[in-house]
Image (tube, coloured by chain):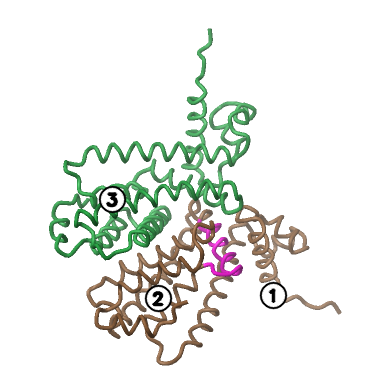
Chain colours: A green, B brown
Amino acid sequence: MPRRVDHEERRRQLAEALWRLVRRGGVEAVSLSLVAAEAQVSKGLVQHYFKSRDQMLVFAIEYANERMRERMERRLAEVAEPASPRHVLRVMLTELLPEDEDRRTESMVGIAFFVTALNDAGLAAYFRAGYDELIQATIAQLRAAQEAGEVRADLDPHHEADILLSLVYGLNSHILLGQQKPATALAVLDYHLDRLAAETDARAVLTTNERS
Amino acid sequence: MPRRVDHEERRRQLAEALWRLVRRGGVEAVSLSLVAAEAQVSKGLVQHYFKSRDQMLVFAIEYANERMRERMERRLAEVAEPASPRHVLRVMLTELLPEDEDRRTESMVGIAFFVTALNDAGLAAYFRAGYDELIQATIAQLRAAQEAGEVRADLDPHHEADILLSLVYGLNSHILLGQQKPATALAVLDYHLDRLAAETDARAVLTTNERS
């Protein structure tokens, strides 16, 4: 009896073929046919799982987000208790930087998705929903850090979250294009985070935070 | 005698056809054939001017940069003398936000170019050179503002320039995708610029700067 291939397992297999294509050939190297060839299955099978390139990108993004969440949870579990909200914020933000091949590929899939969404109202709504989740998590973490006296109380968490995520996306692009090394990008992020620190707590934060 | 078409004029005509395509169909709607159809010329003629899609994108970007510089100079010429360096900085940065259709198209051509450059070392070097020019101009303007006592002297102009341009690119993406209105993006930029203001000068800057 042939081994039954689980539905989710098959989708994951196709998403990973898509990722390998992005890693090798950039975001422009993604199509249903190329994914079929890369996964060594028929184009018909790919179409059985994904009706269009867009659907395939949505799945690849969901898969990437899932991996990102798991990685973040693992890293947060490693943080010594009690974790400071400011440190949790830093872990969240640095996980968005493409420091290794996996995260580099995640970023490139994200850009492919962004570019496609620019011209597709449905995908744009999906993209905005994902971004909203990220911005709300950042705002919540900033507020917790303000309550803990780690971030200046007079700062606007909404504007600060916009600025932090823009900064991370900007640094992301620089790393992808080789304009900046991950370590330099991290130094810029820390420089900015330091300025958000409450005056009374600034020295404590500098010494207790992981700085690499 | 048929009217001779000037070489540069022809290239501009093709770049504008490319822009119309981007405006209507997003960055994915760009190819030599489609540009030829849009400009109502043969594909051979397009290939006479541009050997590849990449060359065409480089020209479109150079053309966009040229237009951006001219627009910036016009806006700076309108600023009442003596212009404060901080105000000049703000004009430079806001010119990068896609507040109208032209700048929206410029941004999308820029993204097409960025995505292509991710997988092409030559284009990546070209892209980095353009970015370097922008970052150096931003650093110079930040330093001038520091000397004029308008920006805090203790800030690192390199890091601040990285943060400002990342912020502008992040806000740019949000506007393009409809996550943020240009006015809201501008409010975030001003919020951040205000924090860079020298304490002694903060009130003066708030009242003398153009705020819309």
Looking at the rendered structure, which numbered label has been put on residue B151? none
Q: Are marks 2 and 1 in contact (CB under 8 Å)?
A: no
Residue placed under numbered mark 1 in the picture = B9
Looking at the rendered structure, which numbered label has been put on residue A89? 3
Q: Residue furthest top?
A: A1
Q: Residue furthest right?
A: B1
Distance (Cα) linking label 1 and label 3: 52 Å
Where does residue B64 sit, x and y in percent of width and height? 57, 70
Subunit that carries the residue with mark 2: B
**In screen coordinates, is B131 left or right of A88?**
right
* Magenta segment: B98-114
Characterize the magenta stretch by its predominant secondary structure: helix
**Residue mark closest to the camera, 3 vs 2:** 3
Give the mark nearest the N terminus, 2 or 1: 1
Same chain, marks 1 and 3? no
Amino acid marked by disc 1: Glu
Q: Nearer the viewer, residue B148 or A205?
A: A205
Q: Nearer the viewer, residue B92 or A159?
A: A159
Residue at image x 50%, y 53%? B120
Looking at the rendered structure, which numbered label has been put on residue B137? 2
Amino acid marked by disc 3: Leu
Distance (Cα) linking label 2 and label 1: 29 Å
Where does residue B113 sit, x and y in percent of width and height? 54, 59
Where does residue B161 sit, x and y in percent of width and height? 35, 69
Secondary structure found at label 3: helix
| Tally of numbered discs | 3
Callout 3 crowding tier (Cα within 10 Å): few <14, some 14–19, many ≥20: some
